[in-house]
Amino acid sequence: MTVTRKSLRIGVDVGGTNTDAVILDLTPSTTTPILASFKSPTTPDVTLGIQRAISGCLEQASTDRSRIQAIAIGTTSFVNSLVERDVRKLERVGVIRLCGAHSRLCPPFVSFPYELRAVLEGPVWMAEGGLQVDGKEISTVDVNEIRGICVELKKQDIKTVAVSGVYSPIDHDLKQEEQVRDVLKAEIPGIKVTISKEVANIGLLERENATILNASLLAFAQVAVSGFRASLEALELDVPLFLTSNDGTLMTCDQAEHFPIKTFSSGPTNSMRGANFLAGLASGGARKETALVIDVGGTTTEVGVLLPTGFPRQAGARHELCGVPLNFSMPHVHSFGLGGGSRVRVDEPTGKVTVGPDSVGYRIEQCLAFGGETLTTTDIVVAAGLAPDVGTVDLVRKVPRAVREAAQARMKNMIELALESMKTSTQDVPVYLVGGGAILAPDVLKGVSKVHRFPFYDAANAVGAACAQVSGVIDTFEDTSTSPLSDVRKKVEQRAIDKAAAAGADPNNTVIVETEVIPIAYTSGRARFYVKAAGPWTGAAVTLGPQSKKSSSGTSNTDSHSVRSLQPANIRSKPLPTIDVPVTAVTILSYIPHVTNEREWILSEVDAEWIAIGCYILGCGGGGSPYSKFLAIRELLRAGATIKIIDISELQDDDLVIWGGGMGSPEVSQERLVNEEYNEAVQELMSFLRGRAYPTGWQTTPNVYDTGTRGESMLPAAMSSGDGNVSRGACVEMGTHAGVAHRPLTKAQCERAMIKNTVSQAWRLGRAVVLANKQSNVSNIGRILVDALGGDSSARVLFSGKVVDVSRKIFKGHSYGEIVIQALKAEEEEDEDPLNPRERFEGTMTNLIAVLDAQTGHALGTPDYKYGLRVFVLGITAAPQWTDTPRGLELGALGAFGYDDIPYEPIGKYVKPRSVIEEYGP
């Protein structure tokens, strides 16, 4: 009896213009793994295009269908539904956040754009539950409370629910989210539930956002996946069907129905995985090199970094999709407006030639080479004789040589700038060209060791789908107090390998493709581990993993029959807008802050956003991102609150100012979002009295001007965790996240100790960053920010480059570390910035030293430092409150950090920021 070896896999990529299919023979000894490749126009009903592409491949290969192991499809169907705000494919989502008394000022949907929020937002509840960073419960899930929520869900006819719990990704024992899901399914048969720990990683707001988006697509996912299955049935193919995920690995149809969001960005991932496969095919084995992959389509070009592991470099911890901040795995891709259909224009007066960004897209018949009337990039390469098999060369002979050469030079420059923005070192690297528009790229590019066009490069996306692997991801906090960090890391990595193997990966060929360890400040012996393992599919059944039918083991504090009547937390007195007003350079330049005749600055949403951006720059990497605080303020403003900013000079002589803020770990503030911590601390302090960029509380200017030696200006102080716990115990006992209020200061003390107009300074910095991005002028962001800070005498761009090494450690509760930034050569800069020095700079505190993202101009906090980031370092002259007295230097200069041998040297002269109230007031 002969046993047929199932060694063939079909990969399909459903693109906007074409649907590509390939058949791969994955037998290890084969010399011709690609048996067929077929391209078919994408149809309105994508299943028809899939059938045609697969049929074309099968006819071309004339292969035995019994050898087909599986079919893998890459699709943009789900993300397109969100991009288009398609109400036919999206459902309203009710949200249950398990947070106890925490995180209530930054509710679900708070970071959604109006238009998407109007389509998706259902009722929201802040319920009992959630964990602290050490795994202890914030509070126990109240089953009666969840049953009460079920009553309201039925009343409002909500069929889909997202459940998110504080620190749920590390909840391995209590399983709070699973417990809530069990109650919902028991009380409301047929309800669709997504729990956050199965969708994304640490970072409550972004993980919750991803959970909501996923939940909104569940109904459509069932329909779409059924269509994909029907395609196979129509072709009489009885084989496993997979969809590809955004990290280049396989998902079963069952998983895709439960987690459609994991297909987002699978296209760029598939192109890079396909490029890796084709590169290995061309060289006779895995190359294991870092390479840049250029995927040229009809409208845009996408550039990604292929790592030696064969997987794409991942985007930063946070990114946006459809205007929604997210944190799940996505490839780091730079996209720009160059494609095979990009329009080429000639400015008649000047003769200047421009390329794109608009395109004829899939309407290829509009190109000159195909009988149309529009000059495109495809016409340029056809006229140059670089694409003999494309179009008709006689139709483009009239294109002037000067125009052709100028357009080619412009395309080359666009590609080189994109490549440079993605490189992680100054060394030349290879480039893999893929995509149907790859004919646009020249054979020689600056900073590139070799340009490769491998066979089947135009079907790389489908190849990537066909060779997709199976992965296992672990994102957790672990105890490192009793074992060396390296040993704990190895154990976590083994868990990731085991998880991949359980999902169907070959355990003998499963490797770690991504690993990161981040110590947690203000805690001892705990660190966050993020590990991903991947390996080839063995052909065994892939386990579902998440959405297990088994009930959770969590316990409740209620009997089995009680129900508590509840109301949603997001009942508003006035409805939100349903249309997002576009923010443009014109609207930014014309914006005027509202300052009253009484010299009160009435804060707007715009002001709050700009101040938050500027505060993070002035924070110099510490303190955590102000983003969630901005969202909380914006939500208050939308609810009708009024927030006023006044000048110190407006205070009466006997007025008092309570000051303080947050204390704790920036990593923890990603999970325990802002609540009433500071307000409760203020109330506790007032009850007791009756009637920082620096890492420690004593490094503040009021302490600089303390008249005594016992810290009288700092004491008394009160601390609150935001849940009523206002004891004066350690911050760690409050989950390393607390609000602190210090002794009130008099007007005279404020005039002497406080640095004036810092809110105005933050506002100007934020405005400058937003405007530079809207004007596509980020390449000059260094010059722009220096001007916003008062000019060359007050600030300098010290140097720019790429982060090539990051190290972190915890010492006495504080995060210490080092980043190494490799400078770029002058010729490697995208645009010559006159503020970018070529000489070595040695700067010291008390100057403010901020590390900023060179791609956006936004600040980077210490948790954001990551290998490969392109950054620039901004030096800002410190205020005289720090530098004009011996005590200021004692508290703030490098001696306070143990570097007694490095003297303070100012980088310039301090310029007092101009007050917004003075500039725009009466």
Image (cartoon, rainbow, N blue to C red):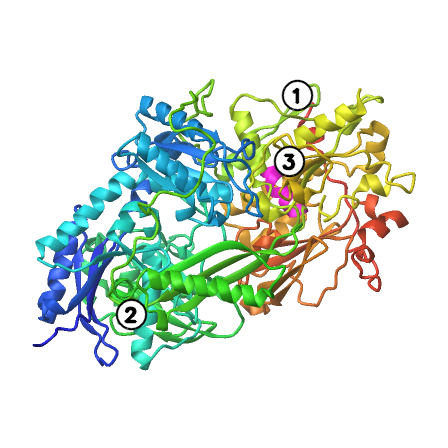
Q: Amino acid at mark 3?
A: Ser
The x and y percentages for residue 833 are 60, 59
Decide if residue 408 is in sight here. no
Q: Say whether disc 2 or disc 1 marks the residue closer to the N-terminus.
A: 2
Q: Say whether disc 3 or disc 1 marks the residue closer to the N-terminus.
A: 1
Q: Amino acid at mark 2?
A: Ala
Q: Secondary structure at mark 3?
A: loop
Q: Nearer the viewer, mark 2 or mark 3?
A: 3
How far apart are the alpha carbons under marks 2 and 3?
A: 68 Å
As drawn, the label of residue 596 is 1
As drawn, the label of residue 272 is none
Residue 674 lies in what quarter of the image?
top right
Q: Count neighbours of disc 2 (C-alpha within 10 A) and say few if under 14, some if 14 to 19, many if 20 or more.
A: some
Instruction: Identify the residue position indicated by label 3 in the image.
Output: 721
Q: Residue at x 68, y 19 (%)?
A: 597
Compared to residue 685, the image places residue 275 above or below, namely below
Instruction: Identify the residue position indicated by label 2 in the image.
Output: 384
Q: Say whether disc 2 or disc 3 marks the residue closer to the N-terminus.
A: 2
Query: Most prominent secondary structure in the magenta stretch?
Result: helix
Q: Secondary structure at mark 1?
A: loop
